Image (spheres, rainbow, N blue to C red):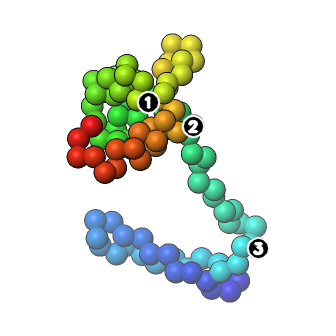
Amino acid sequence: MALGNLLQLNFNGSHICSISVPAGDDDPRFKRISPPPKPLCVRINVAAQMIGIGKTKMYELIKTGEVDTLKIGKSTLVTMASLEAFVQKHLRCSTL
């Protein structure tokens, strides 16, 4: 096995150890891990956290129609598309 990348492990800024990992993707012992898919919708509290506001302000934005929601059972979800559009719309504004 040819040596490839050197993986260094650190904890609180202190070097713990170094591990040599294979350079090629052909080694069957190592699988490439894909990032999780981007969510289409998130819960209200998560949407509020994502843009740095409180839940009360998020509920105001929902009530005024500035962000879109959908209801699945008892869960109310904010669409990522409307959240991203809201942020883009207010990028140059100083206040929401």
Disc 1: which residue: 67
Q: Amino acid at mark 3?
A: Asp
Q: Amino acid at mark 1?
A: Val
In the image, 65: left or right of 81? left
Per the model, the C-alpha gap separating discs 2 and 3 is: 34 Å
Residue 2, compared with residue 30, is above or below; it is: below
As drawn, the label of residue 58 is none
Residue 53 visible, this angle: yes
Q: Amino acid at mark 2?
A: Leu
In the image, 75: left or right of 92? right
Q: Earlier in the sequence, mark 2 or mark 3?
A: 3
Q: Percent position (x, y) of residue 40? A: 57, 37
Which corner quadrant of the image does residue 86 belong to?
A: top left
Residue farthest to the left, as pictured: 94
Q: Percent position (x, y) of residue 28? A: 76, 67
Disc 2: which residue: 40
Question: Which numbered mark, 2 or 1, is in the foreground of this view?
Answer: 1
Are the residues flagged by discs 2 and 3 in contact, CB closer than 8 Å? Answer: no
Which corner quadrant of the image does residue 44 belong to?
A: top left
Residue 44 visible, this angle: no
Q: Percent position (x, y) of residue 17? A: 42, 75
Where's the N terminus, which quadrant?
A: bottom right
Residue at image coords 28%, 46%? 93
Which corner quadrant of the image does residue 56 belong to?
A: top left
Number of numbered discs: 3
Residue 18 vs residue 75, the one in the foreground = 75
Identify the element where label 3 is drawn: loop
Label 2, residues with CA under 10 Å away: few <14, some 14-19, many ≥20: few
